[in-house]
Image: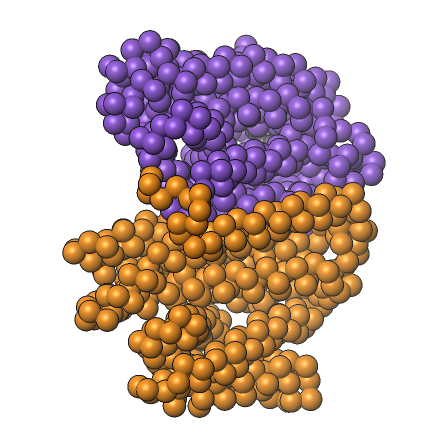
Amino acid sequence: MNHPVWDLPWMGSGWIIGLVSIIHVSIAHLVVGAGFWLAFMETRAQRARDGELQGWLRGRAKSLLWLSSIFGAATGVGIWVAIGLVSPTATQHLIRAFVMGWATEWLLFAGEMATLIVLVRAYGRLSPGQRLALVWLYALCAWLSLVVINGIVTFMLSPGKGWTASHAMVDGFFNATYLPSLWLRSCVALALGGLWAMAGRIPPGLKVRVLKPTALSVVAGILLAGLSGWFYFQSFPAAGKELVLGNLRGATGLAEGFRWALLGLGAFLLPALLALWAFLRGDAFRRSAAVFGLLLACWGFGGFEWIREVARKPYVIREVMYSNGIRVEQVSGYQKDGFLPANVWARTFAASKGDTDLARGEAILRSQCLACHTREGYRSLKALTAPYSESDLVALVQSLRELDPGMNPYLDRMPPFAGTEQEAEQVGKYLHTLKAK
Amino acid sequence: MSPLPIPAPDPLPLPLPPGVLKALLLATFTLHLMAVNLGVGGSLLAAAHALRGKEEDRDLVRRLAPLLPASVTFAITLGVAPLLFVQLIYGPFFYTASVLTAVPWLALIFLLMAGYVLLYRFVDSVETQALRAFSGIFGTLLMLGAGLALTNVTTLSLRPDLWAAHAAASPHGLRLNTVDPTLWPRFLHMAAAMIAVAGLFLAGWGAWRHHAYARRVGLRWFLAATASQALWGTWLLVAQPKPLLDLLLNANTAPGLTLWIAIACGALALFMAIPASQKGAPAKDAWAPVILALASVLGMILLRDQMRDAALAGAGFQAAALPHRTDWPSLGIFGLTFLGVAALLVTIFRWAAQPPGSPDTGKELS
């Protein structure tokens, strides 16, 4: 890529995104679901003139504010920090394409925070009608921000021919996976929000009144999420589907993480059983069970996100930009005229190490390979290349230049090597030196 | 010397003219900074008064504390927008700097979260006997650490000439931009300004609500912090690279003019704040220094932007020359959402400001 590379040894920088985003994405969906749950419960409580329930819901709103203002907002910034560090080129491309989308989402997020803050801080000044309006407005803002973000996330999986031609935001936004994904995410939000509610400290007298409707929404959310997940998968681009199925058969080396993701999908179903318990035996239900269920559901959701990312490999934006920030249309130019002449940071790195062949090889490897590999940790190049001799490695990297899937079997999981024959040789030679380390 | 390692900008055009984006950047940054001043500066003030612990101080803390978490929330929320616009306009500089100093930059979020948790602990303890002033202090320090992470990336992004050496010395992005002599004075200048502006807010609130003690100590905080700028401000000025310093010292240039007007406003505010902070001074005397000082802050925000453009022009970058193609449909969606959210905010803030116990409020539940 065009920018400098953050070389995070052993772990690989990609994991930072995974770590921050699993927390952020879970919280972000949770607060959407919790918003609707709160609005629904407040409506019920006011209809029934149930003061005890309203008092308890007030406390829940406060803890929702706590969660979303500390961890939701800060991890939201965290996502920006992480993707900018790990994939600066892609982040810049996405921002250029979607800044008005993010700006819109930001307005909605500001509305979300403001409604919740007013509800919590000015509770005593509000009439019941105003309180009800506020919780519904909060839920609406939170959901609409999902509506917006969903457009950008699904764009990366299925940008569509329209956008490639026009580069207009709306063409990328309403893409092939947009609606199924929105459905799925809304259902997941319902499940997570409900589980969060069940994990709260509920006074014994309220338990059954709270748990019955809440558990029902969790069960519904989980079952509907399963169903819409299937539709979502059907809407994947053919190559993405192929990639996921290939992983399912264990055909490619993505399998280790994939197994965790699949287990996670299974784990996502368990909370439905816990919720069933809460529905049937509300008085005996334990908070800790809901906490456990919530963690399982977050794991499952993380697994789902992971699979979605797999379906995008080896691209960040399918058919537009590879995971290492090289745009598809740049590959042939780099293969002809060289990668180093066009990439100032790879050149700077090589120069700092004396500009030898090995330094150039390492510089290109940092720019083109560290997005998915580390030298000796996660998806270790040292381990993967252990069986090969130096000349094998040179031949292997040179074969990665091949753009025909028939000739380059790696194209479904690795970008083509974007450099000249000679640059490929330099990378091959550098790979060989890893053995000694 | 080899050419500077500045990455090529993204090929997609900007969705709006650069001037408009720049205006949005400055507007959202100003809002962000005000919320930061109130949230972080205010936390420091509150914690300091909590430590002092006289009855009048405790009263002040009780009034100030409930505002703090919301201010920090707004500071974070409002911070995302300028972060976005900076990436949009100054992407090659911003990303390069952040990658080169990746670890301190990433620490930002952890500092924020930890600082925020401590702040909540402090605020929740205000109504109780066991006031947790130290949580407040540590929370503020952690948030100031987040500020340092931002200053660090910002200063580095303006110095492409330092990048190659920084990258070679710090391949894993561990280092701060300490080679740059502007890092520490710039941070201290910002930190002192936070205290000063928080003091101003306090003084303004005190003048408005006829709370003499708040007005007096607010102005005193402002005085002390602003007087210290003679040190940090001068240090920051002389630490500038030569071409930028020449610009600043010449009042015929736009940055030079902005600087001297802003300093004049600040100095005038300082002198007017001295009598206004005395016991028995009339409440309305607080307004002139408050307004002048805010004008000075706005001037400094403008100056900051002028200096950024001047520094990057030296590296051959012109924000105004970036290609754009206005994307009307997405602008329309944004505009409609803006109107909707603005109407929402006005409505709910009016609800929040209505007197308690108006005819149909639910007092019985609270």
Instruction: Answer above or below: position of B196 versus B21.
Output: below
Instruction: Answer above or below: position of A107 versus A284.
Output: below
Colour displayed for chain B in the image of the structure:
orange
Colour displayed for chain A in the image of the structure:
purple
Q: For residue A278, which quarter of the picture? A: top left
Q: Residue furthest front?
A: B359
Q: Is residue A123 left or right of residue A208?
A: right
Q: Residue furthest right?
A: A165
Q: Residue at x 59, y 13 (%)?
A: A230
Residue closest to the eye, B222 or A292: B222
Where in the figure is residue A26, as x and y percent of width and height?
46, 32
Where in the figure is residue B298, as x and y percent of width and height?
57, 73
Q: Is residue B344 left or right of residue A320?
A: left
Q: Residue at x 55, y 25 (%)?
A: A186
Where in the figure is residue A288, as x and y percent of width and height?
27, 23
Q: Is residue A26 visible?
A: no
Instruction: Answer above or below: position of A66 versus A320.
Output: below
